[in-house]
Amino acid sequence: MRRAAWALAVWPWGMPAARPALEADSLAVAKLRDFNAQRGCAGAVCTVKLFFVHLHKCGGTTVESYFRQAYGDAFLVPDTGHEGELRDALVVQNKARIRALRAFARPYRVFARHIAYGYHATVDCARPLYMTMLREPTARLLSLYGYLMFGEGKKYRRFPANATFGEFVRHRTTGTCAESTGGVYQEYCLSNYQTRKICGYYAILETAEPSEETFRCAARHLDLFFFVGTVERMQESLCALGHLLQWRFSFDAKKKLNPSAHAATTDEDLEHLVRWDRKLWHLGDRHLDETLRGLPAGTCAPPAASQRPHLKGR
């Protein structure tokens, strides 16, 4: 089990505070134990809540399906745009709306939505468990391009229907790749999107390009997560997550993997869009390795060497 830090003081709408002192490993284990023990809890009785930072085009829909299988819809914040509404209310400090939205969220114990790190503070959770899935950033861009060009996301597209991937990249750099309905879809246009989301809401709202400071912020927060998986190692990720959360069913993620997950490029034109995300992805891969080493031997056997994706730059 990785050591985790107590995150009560983190406020997602400003620069992150200095990192608090590290928790003892026993406290991190206690939070996970209490979460697993509180399967029938509701409202304030749920002292530990789980926050899945679902990043666009990072296998989150697959993971959410297992959350529903494990806990049922009663334990998930429904797809109502709650996180976007709460974010907007916090920005303008609409206190009445903030209170109403917090009251709406209070009964739930699993938050599996497109949130960013720090969301626990907006719903008054003192004992959060965070997790996420990361993806090789160029592969994520290719998947996003396909989604906006040919998938359900094309209704949000704001670039030509015959745009090449290179043209899509240029639209992303100008922030005009998608409709900004409720601010959610404009996130599609962000450079180093994964790094921004793990750093926190301030990094999403910031107009300046992410810097090494942003990456360090994200790296600090990633170290607080009880679990980090990767799309490229989906089967191992789901197995490890299921073991930690005591899920009693098996996983078959192979058919859900997008082939673009194994794509990679060194195109310099993309570098400013993926530079920090690539570094964060490598951290996530090591995080997963550490989690797997902490499980009983043979719990999550890795795929054959010929089936594992090549992780460039490791």
Image (tube, helix red, strand yellow):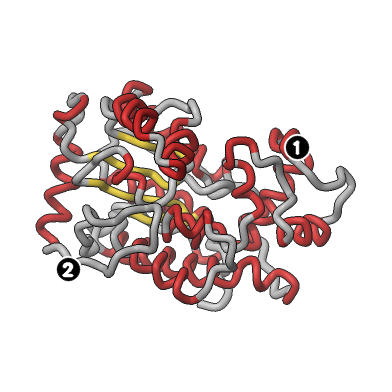
Q: Mark 1 belongs to which amino acid?
A: Lys
Give the vertical position of 165 relative to 281 (above or below).
Answer: above
Residue at image location 74% in from the left, 49% down from the top: 177
Position of 177 compared to 299: left or right?
A: right
Left or right? Give the position of 314 relative to 152.
left
* Residue underneath mark 2: 21
Secondary structure type for disc 2: loop
In the image, farthest residue toward the right:
162
Q: Nearer the viewer, residue 75 or 136?
A: 75
- Circle 1 sits on which residue? 154
The mark nearer the N terminus, 2 or 1, is 2
Cα separation between marks 2 and 1: 45 Å
Rendered residue at 38%/63% (across/down): 15
Q: What residue appears at the point 32 percent right and 35 percent down from the top-left corner?
A: 110
Name the quadrant of the N terminus: bottom left
Q: Could you say where residue 5 lies in the image, as x and y percent from the top left?
A: 21, 61
- Residue 64, position as x, y percentages in the image: 44, 36
Q: Residues within 10 Å of mark 2 (few under 14, many from 20)?
A: few
Q: How many marks?
A: 2
Quarter of image, res 77: top left
Q: Position of residue 13 (x, y in %)?
A: 40, 53
Q: Quadrant of residue 167?
A: bottom right
Q: Which mark is residue 269?
A: none
Secondary-structure class at tag 1: helix
Amino acid under label 2?
Answer: Ala
Identify which residue is drawn at 49% across, 37% down: 84
Q: Tell me, yes or no, if residue 251 can be seen here.
A: no
Q: Is residue 60 visible?
A: yes
Vertical order, 194 against 78 (above or below): below
